[in-house]
């Protein structure tokens, strides 16, 4: 009888402990899901880009009139910097990797060519070269974003 009573107490204590752990685990905010590049792009378009485009289209229709679809392209262009910034915050490893593997060599080659062709200090060519190859870094990020496996392997 005493043995059965101890077993019941242990069972109750175990259930109470499990319940406490469940409650505490539910209160802890879940960690941000590990993003693949593709999921980051998709999420940033949905959470950042789409609201910007909708607000822009709504505003232009209100102020200029016309069909909403006529403003979508221009409004998407307005949302691009915010979506890029979101992707950069979400998957910074992709951005940094593309800067190092694609951007840096292209900038170095551009600066070298400009110095040979025009002469002058290399420093004055860095920013124009950076701007001229930004498309390649963006393309690398988007391409990497589409094929990068998740860090967890799932």
Image (spheres, helix red, strand yellow):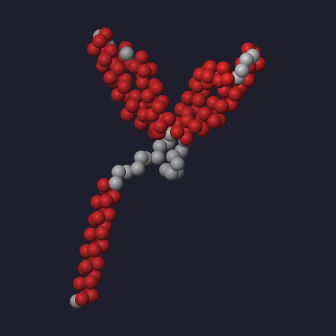
Above or below, 152 against 4 in this view is above
**Residue 35 horizontal side relative to residue 68, left or right:** right
Q: Residue furthest bottom?
A: 1
Q: Quadrant of residue 69?
A: top left
Q: Which residue corresponds to the image point at 43% horizontal and 47% vertical from the top-left?
A: 33
Nearer to us in this view, 116 or 120 = 120
Residue that lies at the very extreme toward the right in this rendered image? 116
Residue at 63%, 36% in the rendered image: 100
* Residue 80 x, y percent position in the rendering: 46, 25
- For residue 15, say whether it is visible: yes
User: How many numbered discs?
Assistant: 0
Q: Quadrant of residue 125?
A: top right
Task: Using residue 2 as the reference point, say whether residue 32 is left or right of it.
Answer: right
- In the displayed structure, 46 sits above or below 54; it is below
The image position of residue 46, as x and y in percent, is: 39, 33
Residue 86 horizontal side relative to residue 125, left or right: left
Residue 38 shows in the view:
no
Residue at image point 31% right, 56% down: 26
Residue 119 occupies which quadrant of the picture?
top right
The N terminus: image quadrant: bottom left
Q: Position of residue 13 (x, y in %)?
A: 28, 74
Relative to residue 107, is residue 95 depicted above or below?
below
Q: Position of residue 97 (x, y in %)?
A: 60, 38
């Amino acid at each position: 009888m005493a043995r059965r009573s101890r077993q019941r107490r242990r069972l109750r204590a175990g259930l109470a402990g499990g319940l406490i752990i469940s409650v505490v685990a539910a209160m802890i905010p879940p960690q941000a899901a590990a993003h693949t590049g593709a999921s980051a792009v998709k999420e940033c378009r949905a959470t950042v880009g789409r609201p910007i485009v909708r607000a822009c289209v709504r505003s232009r229709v209100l102020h200029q009139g016309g069909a909403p679809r006529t403003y979508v392209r221009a409004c998407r262009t307005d949302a691009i910097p915010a979506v890029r910034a979101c992707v950069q915050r979400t998957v910074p490893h992709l951005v940094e990797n593309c800067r190092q593997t694609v951007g840096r060599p292209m900038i170095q080659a551009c600066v070298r060519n400009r110095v040979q062709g025009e002469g002058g200090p290399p420093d004055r060519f860095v920013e124009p070269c950076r701007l001229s190859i930004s498309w390649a870094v963006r393309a690398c990020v988007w391409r990497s974003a589409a094929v990068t496996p998740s860090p967890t392997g799932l």
